[in-house]
Amino acid sequence: MKQIQLNNGVSMPQLGYGVFQIDDLAQCEQAVLDALQTGYRLIDTAATYGNEAAVGRAIAKSGVPRQDIFVSSKVWIQDTGYEKTMASFQKTLANLQTDYLDLYLIHMPYGDYYGSWRAMTELYRAGRIRAIGVCNFLPDRLVDLIQSFDVMPAVNQIELHPFSQRRALRDLMAKYRIAPMAWAPFAEGRNDLFTHPVLKAIGDRYGKTPAQVTLRWLRQRNIIAIPKSVHLARIRQNFAVDDFTLSGADMAAIAALDTGHPLILAVDTCEEAYRLHHITFVQ
Ligand SMILES: NC(=O)c1ccc[n+]([C@@H]2O[C@H](COP(=O)([O-])OP(=O)(O)OC[C@H]3O[C@@H](n4cnc5c(N)ncnc54)[C@H](OP(=O)(O)O)[C@@H]3O)[C@@H](O)[C@H]2O)c1
């Protein structure tokens, strides 16, 4: 399995499994179990998804040693700040039935994320978290955080797929060796990704689906990806991307699909900022 080395020397799998919007906890537990049995060794959850405990049960049941699984979770906006992040972290550990996290992320660039970063830095130095990072941080807040602390984020988890390739943000992140982690690698199906003619024509040449072409494109760009599916056949399909290589022409055709803006979450717009201020915490 391809690994990505983070800027603190820790390695993590390039391809993982995400559990956003799996609200049925029995289904979540089964899906994570299926993913682990398929061979995934990176599982991405978050306090606000409300399913950390189901992920924890699946890991415990799987029989896969804890140290072989790279577990990632996130602190939500209402739990930002030093004390609240410390408490939320403990709850996350209890939910996941573990005594450390591989990756802990600030979920949104809102709230007292400075206080959160202080807490996370302490936990990182104490060996309770192997790597710390952020999600959805755009250039200004990312550089501001870097300037204000002496522990650099290892990862920025961002919406990243063929229709929103985040090239300028990734170029900036590369200067700090901050690894891009693509959420919604399939754009959650927007722009008809699963039947898109360009991705389909490429896939047909290799006997692969548009989903597999997308994941292979991310692999060849050295971008961490965490696709979600609750269907075993798709969980397996999404993992089967080792046995083909996209050509330079394929990569160029996919590069041309970029719209230059996110399709799902633009954290810096007035509408989204207002919505995130009022969103309910579900934990
Ligand atoms: N940090 C953040 O702010 C943030 C935000 C969003 C997501 N995330 C993380 O990123 C992960 C992935 O993103 P996402 O779940 O939003 O979207 P996604 O992975 O782009 O898309 C998931 C959708 O694609 C379908 N799908 C999956 N594989 C398929 C295949 N091979 N063929 C056809 N359809 C397929 C799934 O349906 P079925 O399940 O029915 O198969 C589901 O509807 C999340 O689970 C979460 O861990 C993070």
Image (cartoon, rainbow, N blue to C red):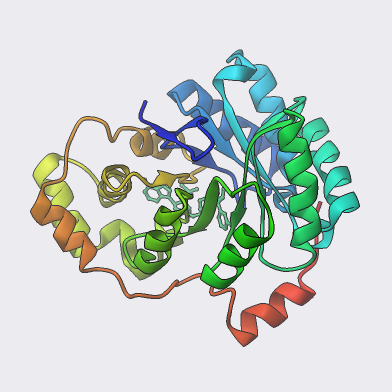
Residue at the extreme bottom: 270
- Tell me residue 253's x, y (percent): 15, 62
| Left-right relation of 258 to 151 | left
Where 272 falls versus 240 (above or below)?
A: below
Q: Nearer the viewer, residue 282 or 43?
A: 43
Residue toward you, 71 or 263: 71
Camera sees residue 24? yes
Quadrant of the image occupied by residue 261? bottom left
Where in the figure is residue 224, as x and y percent of width and height? 43, 44
The quadrant the N terminus occupies is top left
263 sits to left or right of 204: right
Q: Is residue 169 above or below residue 53?
A: below
Q: Residue at x 71, y 82 (%)?
A: 274
Q: Is residue 202 left or right of residue 137?
A: left
Residue 49 location, x and y as percent? 70, 51
**Where does the image place residue 20, in percent across and percent down from the top left?**
60, 51
Q: Looking at the image, which residue is at 78% across and 40% down? A: 122
User: What is the number of callouts on the image?
Assistant: 0
Q: In the depicted view, which residue is nearer to us: 6 or 283? A: 6
In percent of the image, x 47 and y 29: which residue is there?
40
Residue 185 in view: no
Does residue 59 appear left or right of residue 76 in this picture?
left
The image quarter in which residue 44 lies: top right
**What residue sits 44% from the left and 71% below the top?**
262
